[in-house]
Image (cartoon, rainbow, N blue to C red):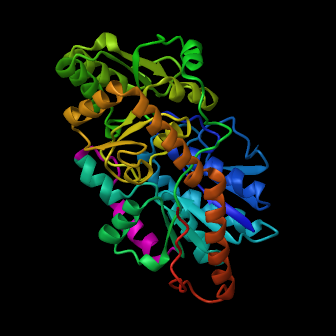
């Protein structure tokens, strides 16, 4: 097949860890690579966010097309909506000029869906839609701090109605689509996110700590990912403080992520807020901000930690818990979204309510008190990750989705856009 992946704000070439660079960047990069390895022709379309970028870059055999839409500079994704008509015009023109038509176009995020829908209408290319986050769910949790306009809701409504297939990343994502958008379950495919076994596998803890310069015997808690408020990192700080105040256990919290290699409060304002939380909790000296790190370095961080903690308010999927599990590290995660699916409570780690530092402290205490049980949880997590969440498996599941949708699209390409028919798609482990 010839496949177009659209990811307007999340380039597969960007380094993850910044405010707007995270799971979607990783998802698009790995899906594109897996599909190329399977023999498909894959192009990724992303907004040109630097002036010196070439029109097309190559990534492991995948073409990455830098779309001129808005100023060629990094912009918050909340500011990109006015530039999507230009993105859509370029995308339609590019697809029209290709000598071989695309069999399917897979849009990632609602603004990519806007542009991809124009291609569906103009060229009858079947549309697969992954939202990665839903506007109405985001508004419920972020309220007035949500920077997207209400227009997002009507755009998402149209995409839910008209996409040939919607990829939900976990059962909670599917439930949100049905509850808040009245999605037709027969047009939803459940396909998770994944990890690369060549990137993430267990490393001897002592060796990992030696490379990172961590104390050999200190109880180490890891938080890794985008540093934004909804990720609930302040809850992790408070949980570590409660562990010390109520149970007498002094842990070291390492926070990895941000928009610069050295932790910088100007580049990453969330660091300043979190430092304030740590100061008020009286554990300034127990919290270390590491800064952003390259993907190849993360294996050591996951492996060096006694436990990985992530307690966001909401999470469409959450790739970092799977990466931690792949490294044999037990996970304490918020009982929300995709984390509820990837982490098996009491088996690979623990699920706790978001914004509940007392509950988190209790689970941290359990990990600290029984290292042998924690190691068993880590091993169970590694097995689960290897069984269900490799990018190779995810690529195969998406390939099946594309093939079915492309077949349907080819059968009616000459007709007007219509609701997809056929059996429900369930590509999910």
Residue at image coords 47%, 19%: 290
Q: Is residue 253 visible?
A: yes
Residue at image coords 72%, 69%: 102
Image coordinates of residue 318 in percent, x first then y, are: 45, 46
Image coordinates of residue 390 in percent, x first then y, are: 61, 50
Q: Is residue 67 visible?
A: no
Q: Does the magenta stretch include residue 325?
A: no
Image coordinates of residue 176 in percent, x first then y, are: 34, 64
Residue at image coords 47%, 28%: 257
Viewer-nearest residue: 277 or 412: 277
The answer to whether 63 appears left or right of 200 in the picture is: right
Which residue occupies the extreme right position in the image?
A: 99
Q: How many numbered marks are there? A: 0
Residue at image coords 55%, 17%: 206
The answer to whether 150 appears left or right of 37 in the picture is: left
Viewer-nearest residue: 175 or 262: 175
Q: In which quarter of the image is residue 396?
A: bottom right
Which residue occupies the extreme left position in the image?
A: 246
Image coordinates of residue 330 in percent, x first then y, are: 44, 36
Q: Is residue 401 above or below residue 195?
A: below
Q: Is residue 198 above or below residue 124?
A: above
Q: In this view, does 231 lie above or below 419?
A: above
Viewer-nearest residue: 275 or 91: 275
The span picked out in magenta is 144-163
Quarter of the image where the N terminus is located: bottom right
The answer to whether 129 appears left or right of 36 in the picture is: left
Q: Is the magenta stretch mostly helix, strand or loop?
A: helix
């Amino acid at each position: 097949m010839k496949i177009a992946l659209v990811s307007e704000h999340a380039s597969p070439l960007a380094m993850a860890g910044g405010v707007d660079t995270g799971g979607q960047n990783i998802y698009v990069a790995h899906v594109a690579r897996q599909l190329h390895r399977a023999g498909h022709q894959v192009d990724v379309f992303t907004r040109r966010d630097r002036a010196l970028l070439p029109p097309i870059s190559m990534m492991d055999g995948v073409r990455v097309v830098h779309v001129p839409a808005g100023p060629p500079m990094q912009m918050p994704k909340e500011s990109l909506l006015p530039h999507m008509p230009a993105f859509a015009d370029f995308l339609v023109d590019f697809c029209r000029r290709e000598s071989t038509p695309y069999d399917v176009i897979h849009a990632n995020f609602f603004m990519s869906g806007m542009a991809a829908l124009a291609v569906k209408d103009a060229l009858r290319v079947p549309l697969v839609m992954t939202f990665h986050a839903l506007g109405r769910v985001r508004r419920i949790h972020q309220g007035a701090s949500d920077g997207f306009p209400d227009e997002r809701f009507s755009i998402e409504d149209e995409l839910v109605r008209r996409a040939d297939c919607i990829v939900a990343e976990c059962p909670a994502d599917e439930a949100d689509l049905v509850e808040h958008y009245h999605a037709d379950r027969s047009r939803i495919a459940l396909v998770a996110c994944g990890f690369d076994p060549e990137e993430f596998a267990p490393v001897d803890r002592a060796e990992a700590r030696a490379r990172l310069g961590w104390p050999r015997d200190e109880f180490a808690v890891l938080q890794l990912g985008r540093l934004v408020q909804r990720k609930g990192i302040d809850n992790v700080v408070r949980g570590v403080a409660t562990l010390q105040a109520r149970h007498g256990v002094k842990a070291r919290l390492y926070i990895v992520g941000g928009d610069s290699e050295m932790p910088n409060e100007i580049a990453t304002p969330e660091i300043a807020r979190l430092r304030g939380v740590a100061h008020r909790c009286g554990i300034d000296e127990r919290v270390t901000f590491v800064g952003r790190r390259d993907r190849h370095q993360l294996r050591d961080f996951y492996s060096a930690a006694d436990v990985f903690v992530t307690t966001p308010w909401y999470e469409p999927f959450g790739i970092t818990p799977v990466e931690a599990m792949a490294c044999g590290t037990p996970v304490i995660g918020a009982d929300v979204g995709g984390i509820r699916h990837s982490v098996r409570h009491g088996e690979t780690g623990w699920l706790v309510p978001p914004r509940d530092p007392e509950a988190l402290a209790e689970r941290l205490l359990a990990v600290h008190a029984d290292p042998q049980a924690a190691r068993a949880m880590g091993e169970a997590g590694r097995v689960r990750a290897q069984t269900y969440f490799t990018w190779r498996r995810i690529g195969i599941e998406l390939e099946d989705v594309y093939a079915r949708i492309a077949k349907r699209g080819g059968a009616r390409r000459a007709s007007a856009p219509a609701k997809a028919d056929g059996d429900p798609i369930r590509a999910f482990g």
